[in-house]
Amino acid sequence: MKIKEETIKNIAEKSFKLVFRTTTEAPGFVHLVFNKKEITPYRFRYIMIDLKKELSKLSVSTFNKKLSYHWLVRFDQQVNTPFHIDNAADESILMLGYEPSEIKSELHVADYHAYANKAYKTSEDYANKFTPVFKEDDDLLKPFTSKINSVKEDNYSIVIINNSNPKSNVETLGIYHKALIINKDLSKNRVVNSMVLNVVSIDEITEDEKKETIFLNTNLISK
């Protein structure tokens, strides 16, 4: 989805419908593309935080639960990963913010619920066998996989993913994701701004503002 002159509120509303899904009819992710000429790294991080706040409002109004940071980091990632969900609460959202880079890469997402509906007799059968890292042949997930060219030289992009696992107490349906680095080059950066957002009780005490201040003002890029 290319973003042109849209408010954060409108972007969040469109994204919420795609990501906070309760059936496999929605994809469980959204890819937002921003023109490089209109954004700075600082402004980009600010957009991510504003999106988090708007998505949290929508989560409260829909599920009576808010979003709180499990982590909020900025790092240089040039390592392939298997299909997985990130370590977080049972119900969580992953927001990945990619800065422009010459390092070509792909992000693959796979709908493990759609896969389970085909491969298992009941959802309970799959939930009992579910692991955070997919340990079977990736070809099994191929019919349920989408490829995203998330990093390019001429734009910033955000991918928001439902990172939940298939537990009985989870209201929305998660998906797997994996990174594939096409041309690794450690002399250059592939900067990823990563938020993992736990879906928590509206009464839970959090330190989100403190984490946001550190995130916005940091010049560090973790390896």
Image: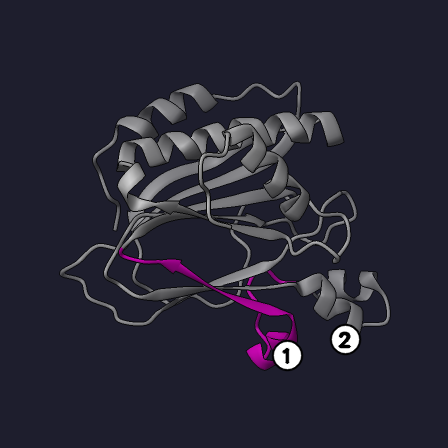
Name the residue furthest left: 187
Relative to 176, say whether 161 is above or below: above
Instruction: Determine the residue positioned at 26% across, 71% down.
Output: 183
Q: Looking at the picture, how far across and down is residue 52, in whole percent?
A: 51, 32
Label pair 1/2, CB-CB below 8 angstroms: yes
The CA distance from mark 1 to mark 2 is 9 Å
Query: Which residue was labeled with disc 2?
Result: 119
Position above or below: 105 against 222:
below
Q: Examine the rendered structure and indicate whether residue 96 appears above or below residue 142.
A: above
Q: Secondary structure at mark 2?
A: helix
Tell me the kind of residue under disc 2: Ala
Q: Which span of residues is magenta-colored?
A: 130-153
Position of 19 with respect to 194 (left or right) is right
Based on the displayed image, in which of its 4 quarters is residue 88 positioned?
Answer: top right
Which residue corresponds to the image point at 65% horizontal and 53% vertical from the top-left?
174
Front position in the image: 10 or 50: 10
Q: Can I make out residue 217 in this image?
A: yes
Please report whichever mark, 1 or 2, sits nearer to the chain's N-terminal start.
2
Q: In this orientation, which residue lies closer to the viewer: 12 or 211?
A: 12
The image's mark for residue 140 is 1
- Residue at image location 32% in from the left, 28% down from the top: 216
Question: Which labelled disc corresponds to residue 113?
Answer: none
Residue 120 placed where, x, y %? Answer: 80, 72
Q: Residues within 10 Å of mark 2 (few under 14, many from 20)?
A: few
Magenta span includes 145 = yes
Taking 37 as reference, is 31 left or right?
A: right
Please state the total of marks drawn on the protein image: 2
- Residue type indicated by callout 1: Leu
Q: Position of residue 74 (x, y in %)?
A: 32, 42
